Image: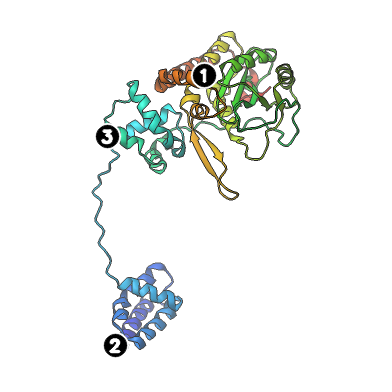
C-alpha cells in the first residue's frame, strides 16, 4: 500500500511537470531536483526496503542521478534542518575601528591585507605614542588583532575609490651571466648585496641635462636608499653617501643599467672599493621583486615628470631622506622563505626589523637604528612627504614642458 502511495505521489509530481512544461519530462535544474527530493523525502524515510528501492528507481529515472547520490539526497532532505539564528547586524569592528584601520593603511601607502596585518601590532602603539591615533584600549586591541582577510573586506570600499599606485618593473636584468667583478661570493642572504639602478628624469623627452636618481636596494633586508644627482659623473658621490647611511657595508652591486655609461662608472667604483659587481642576481631563491617594488615607489613620487633644475634636485633629495625613514622603518615587505619544493611561504616584516635581527649586523649599528626608530612618527613623515611631493610636482608643472612630454608621459628611463 505504501509502495503504491509513494509511486502515485512521484507520478503526480512528474505529471504536474508535464502539464506545466510539456517539453520537459525530467528534473534538469537544481531547483527541480530539490523540489522532487523534498516531495518524497519523508515517504522514503518511513518506507520499507522494497518501497525504498522503487522510490530510488523513479528518482534516478527523473533526475539522472546515481542511486548512491539519490539515497544521500533523500536522507539529507528528510532530516530536520536546524533553524539559523538571524544576524543582529552588530559587528565588533565598528566605524571607529575601521577609521583607525584606514588611517594606518594610508600612512603605509595602502598595502594589501597580507602585508598590513603583521605590522599593525607594532604600528598602532607607535602612532598612539605620538598622538596620531586617539583610540581606546579596546579599539587598539581589535585593530591589532585583525586578520588579513578582515582588513581587505573592511577596506574594500576605499580600495575601489582610491587610485592604486603604479607598479613598474625595473630595468631588465641579465640573470645567468657571470659577475663582471668578484671580490666576494654573491650571497643574497647577507646584508650588503644590493640591486642598483640609475634612473633619468627626462619625462619622455631629450635625456640631456635632466636629473638622475640612484636607487639601491639591499636584497636580504629590503633596505632602500635613493639619491638624486645632476649628471652621471656624480653617481659615485651618490653611492658614497648611500654607503655612509646604510647600517651595513656594501659587499656587492647588481646593476640594472646594462651596457650604459652609468654601468661603466659603477664598475669603476666597485673596482676601487673591491666590491663585487654583476649584471645578475643568482636565480636560486633570490627575491627579485624587492628591487622592483622600490623602483616603482620612486616613480610614484616623481610621477614621470621631467626634472632638470637645482631647486628640484634639492627637493628630491629632501623627499628621499624622509622617504628612507618611512619605508625602511615602517613599510612591510614580503620575502619568500624556503618551505619545501612545492610550497611557498612569505616572511612579512619591515627592513628595519630584518636588519636588527640579522646576526651579521653589528650591535653598534643595531643600537643606532633602535635610537632612531624611537624618535620617528610615521604619520608625520607621511604628511611631510606628501607636502614635499606636491611641491615638487608644482615646480615641474611651472617649468616649460618639452615637446616630447606631451606625447610620451612615461615613468622615466634607466640611464
Quarter occupied by residue 63: bottom left
Earlier sequence position, callout 3 versus callout 2: 2
Q: Residue furthest top?
A: 310
Q: At which x and y percent is residue 405?
A: 62, 21
Residue at horizontal 40 percent and vertical 30 percent from the top: 122
Quadrant of the snapshot with the N terminus: bottom left
- Coloured how? rainbow
As drawn, is 135 to the left or to the right of 233?
left
Name the residue furthest bottom: 1
Percent coordinates x, y for residue 47 in the rendering? 30, 84
The tag earlier along the polypeptide, 3 or 1, is: 3
In screen coordinates, is 394 left or right of 219?
A: left
Which mark sits nearer the N-terminus, 2 or 1? 2
Residue toward you, 249 or 18: 249
Q: Are marks 3 and 2 in contact (CB under 8 Å)?
A: no
Q: Which mark is residue 316?
A: none
**Disc 3/disc 2 C-alpha distance (Å):** 63 Å
Q: Is residue 39 left or right of residue 254?
A: left
The kind of secondary structure element at disc 2 is: helix
Please give the residue where the numbered disc 3 appears in the rendered image: 138
Residue 85 percent coordinates (x, y)? 24, 56
Q: What residue does disc 2 label?
A: 2
**Whole-percent x and y of residue 310?**
59, 8
Q: Quadrant of the C terminus?
A: top right
Q: Which residue is mark 1?
A: 364
Determine the CA span between mark 2 and mark 1. Answer: 89 Å
Nearest the camera: 19 or 50? 50
The image quadrant that residue 236 belongs to is top right
In front of the other: label 3 or label 2? 3
Amino acid at each position: 500500500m505504501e509502495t503504491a502511495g509513494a509511486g502515485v505521489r512521484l507520478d503526480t509530481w512528474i505529471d504536474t511537470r508535464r502539464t506545466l512544461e510539456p517539453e520537459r519530462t525530467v528534473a534538469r535544474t537544481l531547483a527541480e531536483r530539490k523540489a522532487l527530493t523534498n516531495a518524497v523525502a519523508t515517504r522514503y524515510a518511513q518506507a520499507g526496503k522494497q518501497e525504498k528501492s522503487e522510490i530510488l528507481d523513479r528518482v534516478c529515472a527523473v533526475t539522472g542521478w546515481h542511486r548512491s547520490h539519490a539515497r544521500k539526497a533523500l536522507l539529507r532532505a528528510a532530516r530536520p534542518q536546524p533553524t539559523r539564528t538571524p544576524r543582529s547586524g552588530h559587528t565588533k569592528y565598528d566605524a571607529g575601528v575601521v577609521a583607525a584601520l584606514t588611517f594606518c593603511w594610508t600612512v603605509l601607502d595602502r598595502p594589501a591585507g597580507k602585508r598590513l596585518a603583521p605590522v599593525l601590532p607594532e604600528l598602532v602603539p607607535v602612532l598612539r605614542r605620538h598622538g596620531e591615533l586617539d583610540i581606546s584600549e579596546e579599539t587598539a586591541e581589535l585593530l591589532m588583532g585583525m586578520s588579513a582577510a578582515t582588513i581587505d573586506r573592511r577596506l574594500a570600499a576605499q580600495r575601489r575609490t582610491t587610485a592604486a599606485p603604479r607598479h613598474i618593473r625595473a630595468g631588465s636584468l641579465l640573470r645567468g651571466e657571470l659577475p663582471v667583478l668578484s671580490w666576494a661570493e654573491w650571497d643574497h642572504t647577507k646584508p650588503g648585496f644590493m640591486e642598483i639602478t640609475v634612473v633619468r628624469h627626462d619625462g619622455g623627452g631629450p635625456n640631456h641635462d635632466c636629473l638622475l636618481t640612484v636607487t639601491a636596494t639591499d636584497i636580504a633586508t629590503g633596505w632602500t636608499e635613493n639619491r638624486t644627482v645632476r649628471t652621471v659623473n656624480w653617481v659615485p658621490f651618490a653611492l658614497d653617501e648611500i654607503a655612509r647611511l646604510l647600517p651595513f657595508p656594501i659587499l656587492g652591486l647588481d646593476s640594472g643599467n646594462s651596457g650604459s655609461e652609468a654601468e661603466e662608472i659603477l664598475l669603476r667604483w666597485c673596482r676601487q672599493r673591491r666590491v663585487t659587481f654583476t649584471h645578475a642576481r643568482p636565480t636560486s631563491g633570490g627575491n627579485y621583486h624587492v628591487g622592483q617594488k622600490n623602483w616603482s615607489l620612486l616613480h610614484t613620487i616623481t610621477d614621470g615628470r621631467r626634472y632638470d633644475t637645482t631647486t628640484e634636485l634639492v627637493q628630491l633629495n629632501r623627499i628621499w631622506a624622509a622617504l628612507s625613514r618611512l619605508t625602511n622603518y615602517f613599510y612591510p615587505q614580503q620575502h619568500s622563505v624556503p618551505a619545501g619544493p612545492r610550497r611557498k611561504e612569505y616572511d612579512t616584516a619591515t627592513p628595519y626589523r630584518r636588519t636588527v635581527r640579522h646576526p651579521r649586523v653589528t650591535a653598534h649599528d643595531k643600537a643606532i637604528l633602535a635610537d632612531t626608530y624611537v624618535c620617528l612618527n610615521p604619520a608625520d613623515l607621511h604628511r611631510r612627504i606628501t607636502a614635499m611631493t606636491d611641491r615638487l610636482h608644482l615646480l615641474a608643472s611651472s617649468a616649460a614642458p618639452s615637446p616630447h612630454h606631451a606625447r610620451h608621459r612615461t615613468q622615466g628611463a634607466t640611464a
